[in-house]
Structure formats: C-alpha cells, structure tokens
Image: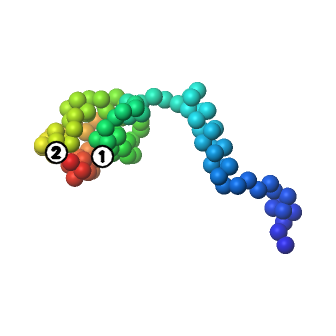
Amino acid sequence: MAPLKEKNRRRIPPQKKIEFFQEKILEWYSTDGRWYHWRKKGLTYYQYIIAEVLLQRTKADTIAKFYPNFLKEFPDWKALGNANVKKIEKYLIPVGLYRQRSKRLMGLA
C-alpha cells in the first residue's frame, strides 16, 4: 500500500509540467535574461555552431566579448577552413581550451 502522502498528492500530467516550466522560464527571461550576440535572430548556422563550440566549458560573458571579433576574423566556413590551425589556436588563447577548440573547429570546417 502506498504511503498516505503519495496517495493524496495531486497528479499533474507531464505535458502540463513542461508547459508550466516553459512559461516560468520565459517570464524570468523577459525580466532577468541577458542578451548575447548569438541570440540575435537571423544568424547563419555557422554563427550558431561557432557560438556552441566557443561556449563549451566557458562563461557566456567571456565569449560575449570574444565572439564578434572571432566572426570578423573567420566570417564563414571557408575562411575558417583556409586558416592555419596555429592561427586559430593563437586567436582562441584568451578563452582557454584553445587546442581542443581549434581542432574541433578545423574538423567542422
């Protein structure tokens, strides 16, 4: 027999829980969320992917300062693919994990 607490607990369907959570997160974001370059509408897949790779294990505020300059230096897959891996590593030093990220980016390009 289930404990009394479990028996009396109101059951909320999973979909309702998800909708409630989505609503609360969006309310929070509208008042407290931060804006970053990679949240702008109309970005290319390249710009989104670069943001994802750069954000791995790094604070968003750190990447926010770095991201626009990275895109100026390497504006598309072709520019990134034509770059020397050492140049990419040197460019990524300020955000850390530069060897892993440069290899990952070169592999993607």
How would you rate the neighbour count of disc 2 (Cα within 10 Å): few for under 14, some for 14-19, many for 20 or more? some
Of residues 36 and 18, the one nearer the viewer is 18
Question: Which of marks 1 and 2 precedes in the sequence?
Answer: 2
Image: 36 above or below 53: above
Q: Amino acid at mark 2?
A: Gly
Residue displayed at 25% across by 39% down = 92
In the image, taking residue 22 as reference, residue 83 lies left or right, namely left
Question: Which residue carries the number 1 mark?
Answer: 97
Image: 8 above or below 22: below
Residue 60 in picture, x, y percent from top left = 41, 36
Residue displayed at 31% across by 33% down = 67
Task: Give the secondary structure at mark 1.
Answer: loop
Of residues 62 and 19, the one nearer the viewer is 19
**On residue 81, which mark appears?**
2
Q: Is residue 102 visible?
A: yes
**On residue 39, which mark appears?**
none
Gap between marks 2 and 1 measured at Cα:
19 Å
Residue displayed at 20% across by 36% down = 74
Of residues 20 and 69, the one nearer the viewer is 20
Q: Quadrant of residue 45?
A: top left
Q: Is residue 62 visible?
A: no
Q: Quadrant of residue 2?
A: bottom right
Asked if the residue at tag 1 contacts the one at tag 2, i.e. Cβ–Cβ closer than 8 Å, the answer is no
Q: Amino acid at mark 1?
A: Leu
Residue displayed at 56% across by 32% down = 29
Residue 1 in picture, x, y percent from top left = 84, 72
